[in-house]
C-alpha cells in the first residue's frame, strides 16, 4: 500500500502518489481541493491511467504528513509544503 506490491501498481503506491502531489503543487501553499485538482491534472498530463480516488489521495497526504513533508495551517486551511533540504 505504501510501496508498490503485487496488488498495488507503482503509480498508485502511497509514496508515489505523495510524490506526485508534491510535483503537482510545488512548494506553494494550497488548499486540499487545489492539491486534489492539481494532482488529477498532473496524472492526466503524465498518462497515469490507474484511478486514484479521493480517499487514496487523503492517505497519501497522511504519509506526507508522517514524513514531515506537509503541514496543515488550521487558520488558513492551507497545506504548507516544507522545502527540500537541498533546495537553497
Image (spheres, helix red, strand yellow):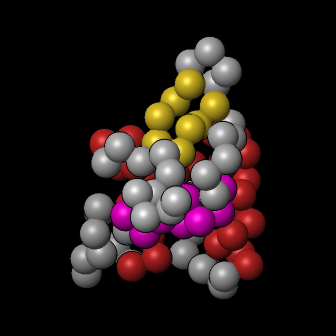
Compared across the picture, whether 88 is left or right of 77 comes to: left
Quarter of image, res 80? top right
Residue 59: in sight, yes or no? Answer: no
Question: Percent from the top left, x then y, of residue 51?
Answer: 57, 68
Compared across the picture, whether 57 is left or right of 38 comes to: left
x 71%, y 58%: residue: 38
Q: Which residues are magenta?
A: 15-25
Extreme residue toward the front, this view: 88
Residue 24 falls inside the magenta stretch = yes
45 above or below 31? Answer: below
Question: Percent from the top left, x then y, of residue 57?
Answer: 51, 52
Question: Percent from the top left, x then y, of residue 58?
Answer: 48, 44
86 above or below 36? Answer: below
Extreme residue toward the bottom, this view: 47
Residue 7 falls inside the magenta stretch = no
Compared across the picture, whether 69 is left or right of 21 comes to: left
Quarter of image, res 73? top right
Comparing 1 with 70, the one in front is 70
Comparing 13 with 8, the one in front is 13
x 58%, y 37%: residue: 79
User: Is the magenta region chiefly helix, strand or loop?
Assistant: helix
x 43%, y 64%: residue: 86
Question: Percent from the top left, x then y, of residue 68?
Answer: 35, 43
Comparing 42 with 81, the one in front is 81
Q: Looking at the figure, which quarter contains the N terminus? A: bottom left
Amino acid at each position: 500500500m505504501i510501496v508498490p506490491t503485487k496488488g498495488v501498481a507503482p503509480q498508485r503506491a502511497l509514496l508515489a502518489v505523495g510524490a506526485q502531489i508534491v510535483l503537482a503543487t510545488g512548494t506553494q501553499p494550497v488548499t486540499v481541493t487545489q492539491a486534489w485538482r492539481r494532482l488529477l491534472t498532473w496524472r492526466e498530463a503524465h498518462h497515469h491511467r490507474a484511478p486514484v480516488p479521493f480517499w487514496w489521495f487523503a492517505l497519501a497526504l497522511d504519509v506526507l504528513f508522517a514524513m514531515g513533508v506537509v503541514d496543515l495551517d488550521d487558520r488558513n486551511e492551507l497545506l504548507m509544503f516544507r522545502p527540500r533540504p537541498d533546495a537553497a
